[in-house]
Amino acid sequence: MRRSSNRPTDAELEILRVLWNHGPSTVREIHDILNQTKPTGYTTVLKLTQIMVEKALVRRNEVQNQRDIAHHGRADRE
C-alpha cells in the first residue's frame, strides 16, 4: 500500500536528520542516536524506516548475507 503523501512527518524528519548528519546508517544506529535525546523504541524506528522506504524518503542498501541494512536519506534538506 502506497502512502498518500511523500512529505515526512516530524518523526520521519528526525530520522532524516540522523541520516543527513551521520550518513548511511542501520536501524540500530539510527535508534541509538535518537535514543540519546528522546526514549525511542527500536521497533518504532524500524517501522518508520519501512514506511519511509515506501514513501521514497530513504533507500535501503541490502547486502547479501548481512543482517544490518543501511538506510540512505533521499529527501532534500528544505
Image: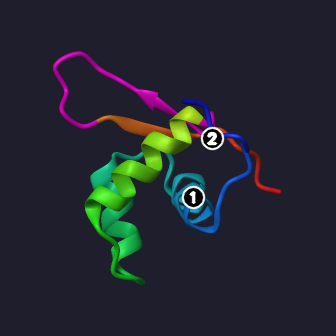
Scheme of image coloration: rainbow
User: Is residue 24 on the magenta stretch?
Assistant: no
Snapshot quadrant of residue 56? top right
**Stretch of the chain drawn in magenta:** 55-68
In depth, the one of 46 and 36 nearer the eye is 46
Residue 24 visible to an observer of this rendering: no
The quarter of the rendered structure image containing the C terminus is bottom right
Is disc 2 placed on a helix, strand or loop? Answer: loop
Q: Which comes sooner in the sequence, label 2 or label 1?
A: 1
Q: Which residue is mark 1?
A: 12
User: Is residue 65 on the magenta stretch?
Assistant: yes
Mark 2 and mark 1 residues within 8 Å of each other at the beta carbon: yes
Look at 71% across and 40% down and name the residue there: 4
Residue 67, position as x, y percentages in the image: 18, 33
Residue 6, position as x, y percentages in the image: 72, 43
Instruction: Classify mark 2: residues with Cα within 10 Å, few (<14), some (14-19) or many (20+).
Output: many
Q: Which residue is mark 2?
A: 57
Snapshot quadrant of residue 54? top right
In depth, the one of 1 and 11 nearer the eye is 1
Residue that extends furthest to the right in the rendered view of this protein: 78
Is disc 1 placed on a helix, strand or loop? Answer: helix
